[in-house]
Image (cartoon, grey):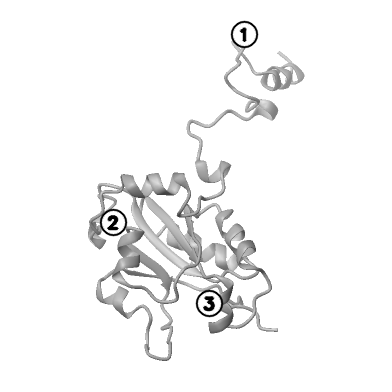
Amino acid sequence: MSALTVTTTLTNGHVKGKLDTTLNGYRKNGYVKPETDLPSLRLAAPYSTDPLAVAERERCAYGRIPRAAAAAGTAPRRVRVYSDGIYDMFHQGHARQLQQAKCVFPNVYLIVGVCNDKLTHSRKGRTVMTEDERYEAVRHCRYVDEVVKDAPWEYDEAFLEKHKIDFLAHDDIPYTTEDCEDTYAMIKAKDMFVATERTEGKSYTSTSF
C-alpha cells in the first residue's frame, strides 16, 4: 500500500476496509480520537451559579480534606482548590499561577474568584479590561474548572463553606488592608493555604490610568 493510499484511508475514517462512522473526523490527518474527552478542552469553565457548577458542588460531600490525603492522592473526592485575583490583561503569568494551583495536588477541581470593577477600582485603581472581560478571560483558561464572579477581597467561614473550599492557592506575599496585616492569616491558621510562585517581570495588579 502506498503512502498516498494510507493517508487517504485515515482521512476517510476507514478501519479494516470498512467506513468507521464513530470517529467524527478525528482520523483526519492521521489523528485518532482520544480515549476520553476533557471538558476543559471543549467548554469554557462555568460560573459558580451555572447548573454545571451547582451540580458539581451539590455532589461534593463536604468535609475539608486533610493536607496529607490531598498530597497523597487518597482523598475520596476531587480536592476543591480556590484561587483569586483581578486578572487584568490576562497574561502568561496569570496562566502559570493557575496551572500551579491546578497541579498543587492530584485530582484538583480549581475554582477561581475574580473581583468585580467596583471593588477593584476602590482597592487597586482602574483596570484596562471590564469585569465581564476579565471573567471571560479566566473562564477560557484550560486549568480553570469554575469561576466565581464578584469575589471578595477577604474571606470568612461562610464563603469557604458556600463554595466547599478545601485549600486556597496564592503567592506567599502577605496582603494587607487597613485593619489586617495578612488577609490570608485565617486561611493559614486552618492549614488551608498552598503557596504558588509569581512569574518574574509580570504585574499581577490592576493598571491605573
Q: Which residue is mark 1?
A: 18
Q: Is residue 129 left or right of residue 170?
A: right
Q: Quadrant of the C terminus?
A: bottom right
Q: Position of residue 122 (x, y in %)?
A: 55, 83
Q: Which residue is mark 3?
A: 119
Q: Is label 3 in contact with label 1 (beta carbons under 8 Å)?
A: no
Q: Residue at x 62, y 8 (%)?
A: 18
Q: Is residue 130 visible?
A: yes
Q: Nearer the viewer, residue 20 or 88?
A: 88
Name the residue furthest bottom: 178
Q: Is label 3 in contact with label 2 (beta carbons under 8 Å)?
A: no
Q: Residue at x 36, y 50 (%)?
A: 57
Q: In the rendered view, would you say 207 is above or below 39?
A: below
Q: Which mark is residue 70?
A: 2
Chain-order first, disc 3 or disc 1 = 1
Amino acid bearing label 1: Lys
- Determine which quarter of the picture holds residue 194: bottom left
Amino acid bearing label 2: Ala
C-alpha gap between disc 3 and disc 2: 33 Å
Q: Position of residue 22 (x, y in %)?
A: 57, 19
Assign a secondary structure to mark 1.
strand
Q: In the rendered view, would you say 54 is above or below 36?
A: below
